Image (tube, rainbow, N blue to C red):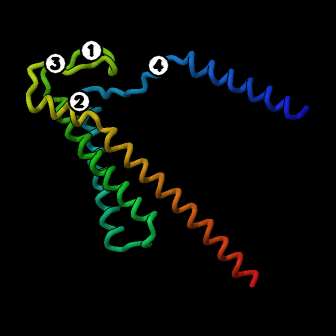
Amino acid sequence: MIKSRFSCLQQIIWVALSLVLLTACPAQAVQVHGPPEGLYVHQMAHVLFAIAMIFLIYTLHMHPVGHCQGWKYLKISLFFFLLWNINALVVHSLGIKLPEGAITGKNLMDQALSGPLTWQRWLFYITRNDHLLCVPAMWFMMLFLKNSYHEAVNEKKELEVCKKT
């Protein structure tokens, strides 16, 4: 009886979740900054974020907290976040310099780069793929957090064993 109720509840949840996901509308979650103040503030935020990454990388290099794998993951994550910020500064700067009509399409997903394809337009196109730097940064940050959690659990177990003896 309990098993059939659970499977019925499970089926209801799957149907509800499927309906929510299949009938979802596009979120349009891209924020456009109004010219020129929005872009200036956005660029300053990238500069401050990059400075923070440099500071953290330098601090962790000069004063290592630990030598386990987790701290290495953190350093790699910070490095990818630094590269992502530098990339974002470049792509925003190139986006300003592109002439009107260099990018066709109204929506972000419909945009395309139009010719003539100069080195600036190619660089803009390549650097626009910033997720190639941001996703690995988040991945290594997740590995750092996971590793730190497992270390904390192991330390707690060791302390409990020491208290018993």
Q: Residue 113 carries which label?
A: none
Pointer 2 or 4: first along the chain:
4
| Total marks placed | 4
Q: Is mark 2 on a helix, strand or loop?
A: loop
Q: Is mark 3 on a helix, strand or loop?
A: loop
Real-space Cα separation, disc 4 to disc 1, in angstroms? 17 Å
Quadrant occupied by the N terminus: top right
Q: Residue 105 carries which label?
A: 1
Q: Where is residue 104 in the image (x, y as percent from the top left)?
A: 22, 16
Task: Answer above or below: position of 16 versus 66.
Answer: above
Amino acid, disc 3: Ser
Real-space Cα separation, disc 3 to disc 4, in angstroms? 26 Å
Real-space Cα separation, disc 3 to disc 2, in angstroms? 24 Å
Task: Answer above or below: position of 139 versus 122.
Answer: below
Real-space Cα separation, disc 2 to disc 4, in angstroms? 28 Å
Q: Mark 2 points at which residue?
A: 36
Identify the residue at horizontal 68%, vertical 21% (top origin).
Answer: 15
Q: Is residue 34 left or right of residue 156?
A: left
Q: Position of residue 144 (x, y in %)?
A: 47, 58
Q: Where is residue 147 in the image (x, y as percent from the top left)?
A: 51, 61
Circles 4 and 1 in contact, beta carbons < 8 Å: no
* Residue depth check, mark 2 versus mark 1: number of the one nearer the observer: 1
Q: Which mark is residue 114?
A: 3
Q: Is mark 1 on a helix, strand or loop?
A: loop
Quadrant occupied by the C terminus: bottom right
Q: Mark 4 points at which residue?
A: 26
Identify the residue at horizontal 29%, vertical 45% (top origin).
Answer: 84
Q: How crowded is mark 1: few (under 14 residues within 10 Å), some or many (20 or more)?
A: few
